[in-house]
Amino acid sequence: MTKKLLVTGASGFLGWNLCQLAKEKWDIYGTYFSQTIDIPGITLVKVDLREFQDMKDLFAEIQPAGVIHTAAHSKPNFCQTHPEESYSINVTASVNIARLSADYDIPCVFTSTDLVFDGLNPPYLETDPVSPISYYGEQKVMAEEGMRSHYPKVAICRMPLMFGITPPTASSFIQPFLKILREGRPLSLFTDEIRTPVSGTTAAKGLLLALEKVQGLVNLGGKERISRYEFGCLMAEVFELSQDNLGRCLQKDVPMAAPRSPDTSLDSSLAFSLGYQPLSVREQLEELRGKV
């Protein structure tokens, strides 16, 4: 009989991409709350992750063999302006899932972020001290620490900037970029924000690897350090769009609620040694051509 995997946030970008990949080997139960979604081959359950009793009942009903927790308020600007609302899902719900996973003694994977770092001493290893500068980064640090204190076996996956195919209920940053360029409008991108991006499919592969092989911290970044502007140029090239309207800007040129780290590149050597093998950014973009 196929083992049951609980995926929280199935209607989100990462959760949806994970469900597409994981359903090949697992019997997937995906949670959603505000955004109703249908994913062929997936059992979807509406549940409020913030309600501990509801989650306890769900675990008892499903009896999952593993959990991957992707649900989150993941927009830093939203978290900065809605600290209490975002805390309840980013921290409280996460810690409760670790508690329940500990009760069942099953593998539990949590999706953290490269934004737990201030961006001043890249690239970052798992052993480097955290230094968040936004409330979103702080919440992820609190979740990491709270989950590990309740369940030392939890796999904390620090995720990079991600892009790719999206469900109707979620977004990825490249869709608006592509729309702007296809319409011939100007697009200015940061030259001073460096990340190690991967596609949603690549990230999902990393999470499934972590489910099997990781306890503790692991980085799931890509193999290239690249600025938003460099990414935009590569994206335009792969999608055969004119770069004439691509412009450069700096983080300080765009006022935002949440402070932004300049370079949160991840050193993912540990994950690479375990079998995580992201393609180049160009190759990952080429896989998306004609799909986004």
Image (spheres, rainbow, N blue to C red):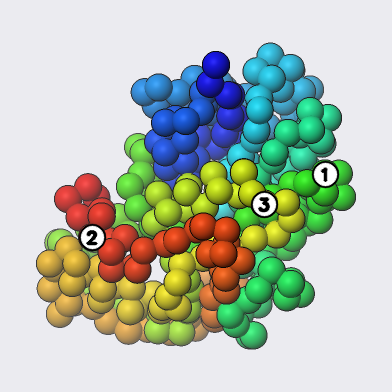
Horizontal side of 89 relative to 1 (left or right) equals: right
Name the residue type under label 1.
Answer: Tyr
Q: Secondary structure at mark 2?
A: helix
Q: Which residue is tagged 3?
A: 214
Is residue 260 in sight in this rendering? no
Is residue 275 in sight in this rendering? yes
Q: Residue 273, relative to residue 39: is it above or below?
A: below
The structure residue drawn at horizontal position 78% and vertical position 46%, both measured from the top left corner, is: 153
Residue 79 in percent (x, y) is at 63, 56
Q: Secondary structure at mark 3?
A: loop
- Numbered label attached to residue 55: none
Q: Residue 283, relative to residue 242: is it above or below?
A: above
Q: Which residue is tagged 2?
A: 286
The structure residue drawn at horizontal position 36% and vertical position 23%, both measured from the top left corner, is: 40
For marks 2 and 1, the one nearer the N-term is 1
The crowd level at tag 2 (other Cα within 10 Å; few <14, some 14-19, many 20+) is some
Q: Nearer the viewer, residue 68 or 270?
A: 270
The mark closer to the camera, 3 or 1, is 3
Residue 37 in percent (x, y) is at 42, 27
The structure residue drawn at horizontal position 22% and vertical position 73%, both measured from the top left corner, is: 186
Q: Secondary structure at mark 1?
A: loop
Q: Which residue is tagged 1?
A: 151
For marks 3 and 1, the one nearer the N-term is 1
Q: Quadrant of residue 257?
A: bottom right
Q: Nearer the viewer, residue 152 or 250?
A: 152
The mark closer to the camera, 3 or 2, is 3
